[in-house]
Structure formats: structure tokens, C-alpha cells
């Protein structure tokens, strides 16, 4: 399916999960699958189940796996939502193509902050616990930020998120962001960061 879509010239994205390190046979097969899939996609977002220990290690098993499903759903919803739905700051298709086209293997991280310096807290959490082992964030090909907050979220905070990301990934000028107000997040800010081109598919293990 990815190959057929890619041949039409459409931007082709995939979101996949890697089995735990202890699942050696399944993981090896998954790695081969990711490498093959990458040849037919502009960007492949990889979520490594082994990294769940960092962000959800204390949760019950069912809830821990639910986080992965939530992340995949949020990734798709946030990208499409900021393009087609009115937001505080919208992304457009050209923004998405700039970041994701020829992005190789990508990682996703999510963080939330409240109180003083909440935007810094959210960015720090999103970048310190990406669900894929990232050797050097500063080498990312591109960065896509999706920022959500309540009615109290300011344009200044949204702008600061982009500035903070530029400090963390100074070697790329491909940083785009979108922002959306969600009344349920009053007092909080949630940041989803997609780091593209952080690894060659051949380096996935």
C-alpha cells in the first residue's frame, strides 16, 4: 500500500512499533520490515516498546500498551487536525512536506507541563523521553511540534516552544509548529514533538 501511494507522488508517512528487546525473533523480523517499508515512505515514525519502561514502566500492562495506541492516534489526529481544522496556529500541507519528506526514520515524544515555566517543562519531557533511542537530537532533519493548551495558553508560549526547539536542534532550519486550544487542558500545556531523519533505516536494531 505504501509503495502504491508513494508512486503517485503523495507524501507517504508510516507509524510502526518495535517489539521489546527481549522478543528477539519478532524484533528482528520487525526491523527488516521497517527497513523495507522505509524505501516506500517519506518518513517512518518508530515507537519502540522497550522505551515504554521510561515513560510508563509503573503502569499496569494494559494501560502501558494503551499509551502506544494513544500516541499513534494522537500523531495522526494532531497532524490532520492542524491542517484541516481552525487552530490558534495552523500547519499547512507544504509545512508537513517540508518536515516529513525524505525524513527517514522519525521519533515521537510527548510532554506536559503546568505552573511556572510550563512550556519549558513540556518541551523537556517530550525530548527527554522519545519513544525511540535517539543518539543526537540536534542532528534531526526536521522537527514538527504540536502544542495544545487551555484558553490561558498564550501566543508567546507557543512561539517560545519553537525557539526552545531551535536551541535543541540548531543544525536544522526545518522546524514547524501548530497550536490548538483544548478547554480540557486549562492550566496545562501538552507538546508532541516529531523528530524526523534521526536515523538511517539501516541503523535500526
Image (cartoon, rainbow, N blue to C red):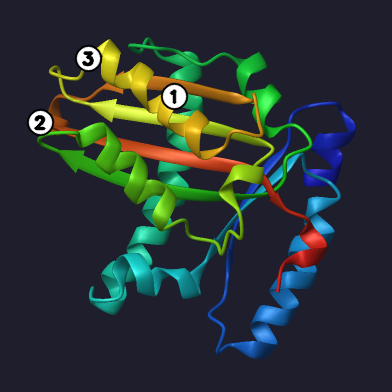
Whichever of callouts 3 and 1 sits on the residue coming sooner in the sequence is 3
Q: Tell me where residue 117 appears, x and y as whole percent.
A: 19, 33
Question: At 21% across and 25% down in the image, what residue appears?
Answer: 182
Residue on which disc 2 sits: 187
**Helix, strand or loop under label 1:** helix
Residue on which disc 3 sits: 154
In space, the residues marked 3 and 2 are separated at their CA atoms by: 11 Å
Q: Is residue 76 above or below residue 97?
A: below
Q: Residues within 10 Å of mark 1 (few under 14, many from 20)?
A: many
Question: At 10% across and 31% down in the image, what residue appears?
Answer: 187
Q: Residues within 10 Å of mark 2 (few under 14, many from 20)?
A: some
Whichever of callouts 2 and 1 sits on the residue coming sooner in the sequence is 1
**Helix, strand or loop under label 2:** loop
Front tag of 2 and 1: 1
Question: At 66% across and 31% down in the image, what residue appears?
Answer: 172
Q: Quadrant of residue 201?
A: bottom right
In space, the residues marked 3 and 1 are separated at their CA atoms by: 13 Å
- State whether residue 1 appears in this view: no
Report the number of discs. 3
Q: Quadrant of residue 89?
A: top left
Whichever of callouts 3 and 2 sits on the residue coming sooner in the sequence is 3
Residue 162's mark?
Answer: 1
Amino acid at each position: 500500500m505504501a509503495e502504491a501511494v508513494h508512486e503517485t507522488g503523495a507524501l507517504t508517512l508510516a507509524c510502526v512499533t518495535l517489539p521489546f528487546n527481549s522478543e528477539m525473533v519478532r524484533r528482528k523480523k520487525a526491523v527488516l520490515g521497517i527497513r523495507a517499508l522505509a524505501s516506500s515512505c517519506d518518513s517512518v515514525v518508530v515507537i519502540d516498546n522497550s522505551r515504554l519502561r521510561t515513560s510508563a514502566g509503573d503502569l499496569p500492562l494494559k494501560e502501558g500498551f494503551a499509551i502506544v495506541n494513544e500516541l499513534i492516534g494522537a500523531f495522526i489526529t494532531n497532524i490532520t487536525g492542524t491542517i484541516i481544522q481552525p487552530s490558534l496556529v495552523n500547519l499547512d500541507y507544504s509545512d508537513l512536506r517540508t518536515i516529513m519528506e525524505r525524513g527517514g526514520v522519525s521519533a515521537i515524544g510527548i510532554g506536559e507541563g503546568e505552573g511556572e515555566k510550563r512550556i519549558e517543562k513540556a518541551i523537556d519531557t517530550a525530548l527527554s523521553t522519545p519513544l525511540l533511542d535517539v543518539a543526537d537530537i540536534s542532528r534531526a532533519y526536521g522537527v514538527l511540534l504540536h502544542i495544545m493548551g487551555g484558553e490561558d495558553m498564550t501566543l508567546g508560549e507557543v512561539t517560545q516552544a519553537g525557539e526552545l526547539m531551535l536551541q535543541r536542534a540548531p543544525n536544522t532550519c526545518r522546524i514547524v509548529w501548530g497550536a490548538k486550544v483544548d478547554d480540557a487542558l486549562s492550566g496545562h500545556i501538552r507538546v508532541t514533538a516529531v523528530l524526523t531523519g534521526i536515523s538511517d533505516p539501516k541503523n535500526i536494531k
